[in-house]
Image (cartoon, grey):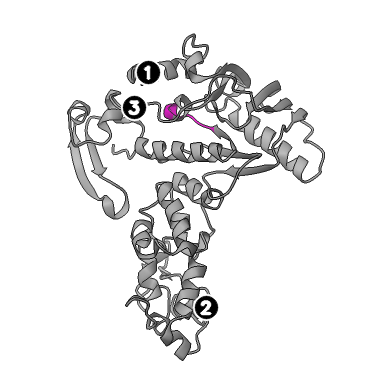
Amino acid sequence: MVVVDHETSIINAADWIIEIGPGSGVKGGTIIDQGTPDQIKASSKSLIAPFLTGSGTLLTRKTQPMDVFKKGAVKLTVSHRFNLNDVSAAFPINRLTSVTGFSGAGKTTLVLDGLLHAFEAKFNKRKLPSYISDFEPGRIKHIVSVDATPVGKNARSTVATYTNIMDYLRKLYAAQPEAKKRKYTASNFSYNNKQGGCPTCGGTGEISLDIQYLPDMVETCPTCGGKRFNKQVLEVKWQGMSIADVLDYDVDQAIDLFGDDTAIGSTLRVLQQMGLGYLHLGEATPTLSGGEAQRLKLTSHMRRSQANTLFIFDEPSVGLHPLDVRVLLKVFSQLIDQGATVLMITHDLDLMANSDYLIDMGPRGGDQGGKIVAVGSPKDLIKTPRSLTTKYLREHFDQYRGK
């Protein structure tokens, strides 16, 4: 059996570990270490070793457990919904809160069916759902729900189009002497129309081969070689590069190219700060992992005040290495510094340990769940574990010796 995973408990249970890195994208692709768990733990080359041994640092943000409700709270009571019956919860404002518990314990029902739907009803001036008996929104005026669903519905959606970087590039190339000579406009530098797109693949960079009795086979377009654009558009150059060449740059490389240009540089730097520097500008967004998709969705929110805004995340650490989780925590801290309230559903012990407040549901899942079994700061809850989650969290703190 071969398992691809970042979960340290699974890695520790493996017979053999192959660690690939050291970074992502062009900075990765190398086997940096391999061996048994004990061999990896003793290795100076391994990046995962500190998280297997507990020699690393667990607490990477300054939590605010004291007077956690100082800035107010959002309050909710779900009278009856699935396995929740008369469940009341308070979510502190301008803090990082984790809702935890067994699968099927009621986390999604409380947060997404309950809290999110209550806010949607309020903002759309509708009646509250019948299963919500009490709702106090506090000072929250805006809500952003960020989940792991793919960004964009097809291969035409890329990192560049989603972040509006593509609009900048189209205008840049339309302003070049050769483009003006040919009377090209920004529309010619879009692969989504006939003026700019490859005539064979229609701008997708791929063609589908119909094979009788078998699923269709997808191949790189033989005409454009996956570049998406027609030959005439690719003849227009900027600094010796076609627009397809620039889209082949990753974010880190593009910063070196455009870093001094405020029109595009600020967006690129936000992507880099969120740990997405390895993504190519022309990378199709539906191919991104859940964790990558969630961070990409945040890019438009990172450069402005988020006072009175609630961000809801559903399993934000899915597919992330422990080092990536630390980047994610920096993003959360930045949002909170900008005035936001951050709430997440999570099973990740690192995220729990770095939260200001925990709401643990259980005690189990399904009919044996639906109750709030523990609330408080992580360090308070591990003193007298009252649930399986807090028991495992205490063991996690012990592994890192509270660091």
Determine contact: label 1, label 2, CB under 8 Å. Answer: no
Residue 348 counted in the magenta span: yes
Q: Which residues are magenta?
A: 345-350
Determine contact: label 3, label 2, CB under 8 Å. Answer: no
> Is residue 239 among what the camera can see?
yes
Q: Residues within 10 Å of mark 1 (few under 14, many from 20)?
A: some
Quarter of the image for the C terminus: give it.
top left
Please identify the quarter of the rendering in which residue 116 is found: top right
Kind of residue indicated by mark 1: Gly
Mark 3 or mark 1, which has the lower sequence index? Answer: 3
Is 28 above or below relative to 209? above
Q: Residues within 10 Å of mark 3 (few under 14, many from 20)?
A: few
The residue that disc 3 covers is 57
Kind of residue indicated by mark 2: Ala
Residue positioned 46% across, 51% down in the render: 270
Disc 3 to disc 2, C-alpha distance: 49 Å
The residue that disc 2 covers is 186
Q: Residues within 10 Å of mark 2 (few under 14, many from 20)?
A: some
